[in-house]
Amino acid sequence: MSIELSEPIREIRQRVQNFIEERVYPVEGLFEGGRTPESEEALRDLMAQAKEAGLWALGHPEEVGGQGLPFLDYVFVNEVVGRSEIAMVALGTHSLQDSIMLMEFASPRWRDQYLKPLVAGEIFPSFAMTEPDVASSDPTQLQTTATLEGGDWIIRGHKWFTSGANRAAYTTVMCRTEPDAADHDAFSMIIVPTDTPGYDIVRDVKVMGHQSGHCEVRYRDVRVPEENLLGPRGAGFKIAQRRLGPGRIFHCMRWLGQAQRAFDLMCERANTRVAFGKELGRHQQIQKFIFDSACEIQSARMLTLHAAKKIDEGDEARVEIGLIKVMGAKMLHNVIDRAIQVHGALGVTEDTPLEGMYRRARFARIYDGPDEVHVMSTARRILRSYQVGDGWDFGLR
């Protein structure tokens, strides 16, 4: 496999890295306590600076206000964006999954109303799939329903981990609309403006003791017009996969950015901190940390780039995405854990970004499908290829 990083993309990548290191890192601490007037002002300022620097919405299509970077080129840039959780929003990349979904499935009305403002950073999206009362790793169990009554959808149900609902203009809600259909044809996506009566945000769910922006939402007879349907009836699973597939690539590239940052911090600490008469990096155990981390980062990176190339070629890359989702999340956790260990007590304080990165890394093994589901589904696909006589030749993948 050969994926060349062109000189123009190298230059963009370096400009993004400089922007993050010089402008985003210094204000990250403002965002650790959740949304505040100070953090909101800092975010608006960063977004304005990114637009002025020509770094805004790099991966969004040009026709809706983005800069139109091809998918594979954007993947390389997203690796750098991932070094800071705040950079995703500051650079306008956080909404790419939702703009892809609207571009492909939304009616002209919703594209006009939401797509350009979304890409411009004037509004924020949210997506509601996970529910607290069922194992949402098996989405055929989802219980939120939408029934068509007099030209309106009436939505009743209970969602949580609806990311960004407390600042979003709308939520795309996965609902059961076809009660008599087979499970994978029973669900639809419906656009719900967040100011609709009955859309009740219960709380911002704390994750490991910190405000997360992942909201619990109850739908109490929420009424929206029939035209708020996104795509065809019964196509909820197809639309979810179209959103989540590229999204998992984006997650994995951002995880590589986080791992790179943790690796940098670990190596800098190992070269400067002295214990037992010599720098930490001269102790064999710390050298093993560096070696193992380098191996895992590079391995995960090649797996991720391979999956991205398959998607770019039009392949759904279900096996490749399953592999990177599990391996990438484990890699991220391991590298950050070692970096914390090298920093000692400092590593678990807010004086470095590592403790926040560690919390988010643990969550990575759950969101967008837990490890166990990806392991099961990936293994089944490989075994099925043997059952039909195709096998699985890694040299041909």
Image (cartoon, rainbow, N blue to C red):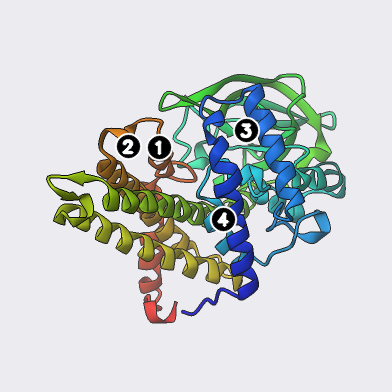
Give coordinates of residue 331: x percent, y percent: 35, 53
Q: Residue at x 39, y 44 (%)?
A: 365
Q: Is residue 52 left or right of residue 76?
A: right
Give coordinates of residue 339: x percent, y percent: 31, 46
Q: Is the C-beta separation of discs 1 and 2 under 8 Å?
A: yes
Residue under label 1: 352
Residue under label 4: 17
The disc placed on residue 315 is: none
Residue under label 3: 164
**Which numbered disc flags the more N-terminal residue, 3 or 4?**
4
Q: Residue at x 49, y 80 (%)?
A: 2
Disc 2/disc 3 C-alpha distance (Å): 28 Å
Disc 3/disc 4 C-alpha distance (Å): 25 Å
Residue under label 2: 347
Disc 1/disc 2 C-alpha distance (Å): 6 Å
**Of labels 3 and 1, the one closer to you:** 1
Q: Is residue 7 visible?
A: yes
Q: Amino acid at mark 3?
A: Gly
Q: Is the C-beta separation of discs 2 and 3 under 8 Å?
A: no
Disc 3/disc 1 C-alpha distance (Å): 25 Å
Residue 70's place in the image compared with 151, above or below, is: below
